[in-house]
Image: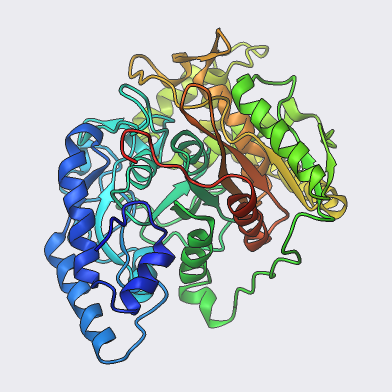
């Protein structure tokens, strides 16, 4: 059996179906890599190997009988720690939830198993999924395979690290503020932030939380764009009461090449800062697309005040997570602190506090503006097929666990910038309920991956993934970390 560490999930499934090796062989291969690489990466933090081996054996027996157990049959994969997997803890990085053992699979896990995937473990997350780095008091710190001391991103940082290192063949994460997209850029993999609510998040919550948060979505991460489509098709669609009446029918892509596509490109913007190594590679991609016959507008002018859009996103994102941010006493303390803020304090810390403590009428007014912005985006995509922009402000940067998140600084071309300002690039798709696919597009001179965020109109998920596939085929594909290749 030749090495399969960096093969696509689709290739692994095909080879298992053809009998080149068994599902059990594939599982053992990735488990061996986990044993060897875990001490340096700490990407996968909870496992159920006995159940995984039983499932792999059942798939091998089904294939031997001539059955076709699903598009992911035998593929060894992991999921973000925040998804319930029966028999494993779901902590979200919180000490208080060490003993929270899931009694049933989340819907995503259930559907992935139904597609034949062999789910053997869970990948690490930051506390409450609320960081662009990945560390917590339960499982410790996850490192990037791209260099000692570098972050893999967050909050799906364990997922991205595991995929990039060839520990897992496929992953599933979540995203409200770039938690799929940031790690995908920093680890040089593919990730897909889904159109809002097309994949139900049942079982992606801590005990006692039943209402799905606004803006937040779940979606796949992979080493190949094609794997994103397979995982999305396996997991998308209504469930429960909604499934009694609703059906999901995502439109098929209307293109199979670059020629004629109307591509808006925004490599940078005066309202924020982006490292030149990120922006320059997006410019190079835009020029390549123009040579291939795409109708490229670069830089595109967006039809709204982007600074106001960014602030709206910060307020509503924090409102969406406010229910799980405090207990009753903590909320009262936060309201009291908010009331001391100066009206002209527009810092991230101040707006985070405001968003966490919005009165219902305040939230409704902001939500009304968000719905107006969704119509603006809809109009924008009548004259543009896709928007290309950064998925993060920079490439992988050094781990930094000191202080509060908005106090931590990252280096942007020799100048410090608050880590949280990167979220600017996440607001377009998140606030607009739009699909966004991250694709790697280059390895920088410093040997680190960088990528592009591909945003499309709502429900054009298969189109943004198709475009990522074209980039993969004709421009740049996943490259393993040099130390592991």
Q: Residue furthest bottom?
A: 65
**What residue lies at 42% left-to-right and 75% top-to-bottom?**
71
The C terminus is located in which quarter? top left
Q: Is residue 366 visible?
A: no
Residue 113 is left or right of residue 178, and the answer is left
Residue 73 figure quarter = bottom left
Residue 382, percent from left and from top: 86, 54
Residue 399 figure quarter = top left
Count of all numbered marks drawn on residues in the image: 0
**Front position in the image: 389 or 327:** 389
Eyeballing the image, is 170 above or below 275? below
Q: Residue furthest top?
A: 415
Residue 65, percent from left and from top: 26, 92
Residue 404 is left or right of residue 246, and the answer is left
Residue 3 is left or right of residue 100, and the answer is right
Q: Residue furthest front?
A: 2
**What residue lies at 25% left-to-right and 78% top-to-bottom?**
59
**Front position in the image: 365 or 235:** 235
Q: Residue furthest left?
A: 50
Residue 235 is left or right of residue 23, and the answer is right
Question: What colouring method underlies this structural image?
Answer: rainbow
The N terminus is located in which quarter? bottom left
Q: Is residue 398 visible?
A: yes
**What residue lies at 33% left-to-right and 89% top-to-bottom?**
67
Residue 227, percent from left and from top: 48, 61
Residue 400, percent from left and from top: 36, 18
**What residue lies at 53% left-to-right and 64% top-to-bottom?**
229
**Front position in the image: 105 or 178:** 178
Eyeballing the image, is 207 above or below 395? below
Eyeballing the image, is 424 above or below 164? above
């Amino acid at each position: 059996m030749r090495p399969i560490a960096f093969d696509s999930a689709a290739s692994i499934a095909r080879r298992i179906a053809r009998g080149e090796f068994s599902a059990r062989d594939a599982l053992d291969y990735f488990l061996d890599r986990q044993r060897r690489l875990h001490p340096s990466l700490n990407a996968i933090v909870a496992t159920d190997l006995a159940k995984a081996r039983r499932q792999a054996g059942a798939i091998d027996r089904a294939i031997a009988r001539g059955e076709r157990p699903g598009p992911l049959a035998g593929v060894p994969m992991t999921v973000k720690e925040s998804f319930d997997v029966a028999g494993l803890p779901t902590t979200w990085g919180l000490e208080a939830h060490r003993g929270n053992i899931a009694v049933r699979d989340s819907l995503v896990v259930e559907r992935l198993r139904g597609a034949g995937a062999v789910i053997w473990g869970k990948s690490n997350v930051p506390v409450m999924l609320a960081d662009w780095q990945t560390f917590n008091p339960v499982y410790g710190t996850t490192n990037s395979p791209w260099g000692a001391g570098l972050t893999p991103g967050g909050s799906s940082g364990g997922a991205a690290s595991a995929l990039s290192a060839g520990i897992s063949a496929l992953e599933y994460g979540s995203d409200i503020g770039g938690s799929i997209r940031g790690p995908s850029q920093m680890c040089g993999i593919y990730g897909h932030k889904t159109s809002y609510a097309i994949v139900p998040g049942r079982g992606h919550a801590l005990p006692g939380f039943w209402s799905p948060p606004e803006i937040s979505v779940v979606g796949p991460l992979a080493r190949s764009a094609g794997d994103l489509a397979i995982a999305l098709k396996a997991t998308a669609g209504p469930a429960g009461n909604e499934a009694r009446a609703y059906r999901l029918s995502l439109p098929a892509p209307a293109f199979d090449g670059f020629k004629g596509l109307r591509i808006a490109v925004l490599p940078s913007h005066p309202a924020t800062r982006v490292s030149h190594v990120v922006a320059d590679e997006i410019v190079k991609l835009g020029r390549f697309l123009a040579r291939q016959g795409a109708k490229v507008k670069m830089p595109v002018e967006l039809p709204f005040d982007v600074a106001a859009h960014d602030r709206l996103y910060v307020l509503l994102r924090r409102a969406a997570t406010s229910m799980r941010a405090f207990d009753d006493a903590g909320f009262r303390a936060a309201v009291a602190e908010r009331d001391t803020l100066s009206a002209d304090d527009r810092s991230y810390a101040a707006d985070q506090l405001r968003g966490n403590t919005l009165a219902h009428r305040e939230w409704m007014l902001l939500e009304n503006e968000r719905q107006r912005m969704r119509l603006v985006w809809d109009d924008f995509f009548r004259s543009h097929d896709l928007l290309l922009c950064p998925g993060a402000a920079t490439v992988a940067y050094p781990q930094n666990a000191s202080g509060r998140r908005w106090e931590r600084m990252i280096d942007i071309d020799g100048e410090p910038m608050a880590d949280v300002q990167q979220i600017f690039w996440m607001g377009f798709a998140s606030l607009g309920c739009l699909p966004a696919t991250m694709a790697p597009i280059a390895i920088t001179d410093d040997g680190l991956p960088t990528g592009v965020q591909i945003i499309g109109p709502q429900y054009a998920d298969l189109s943004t993934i198709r475009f990522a596939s074209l980039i993969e085929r004709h421009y740049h594909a996943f490259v393993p970390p040099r130390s592991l290749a």
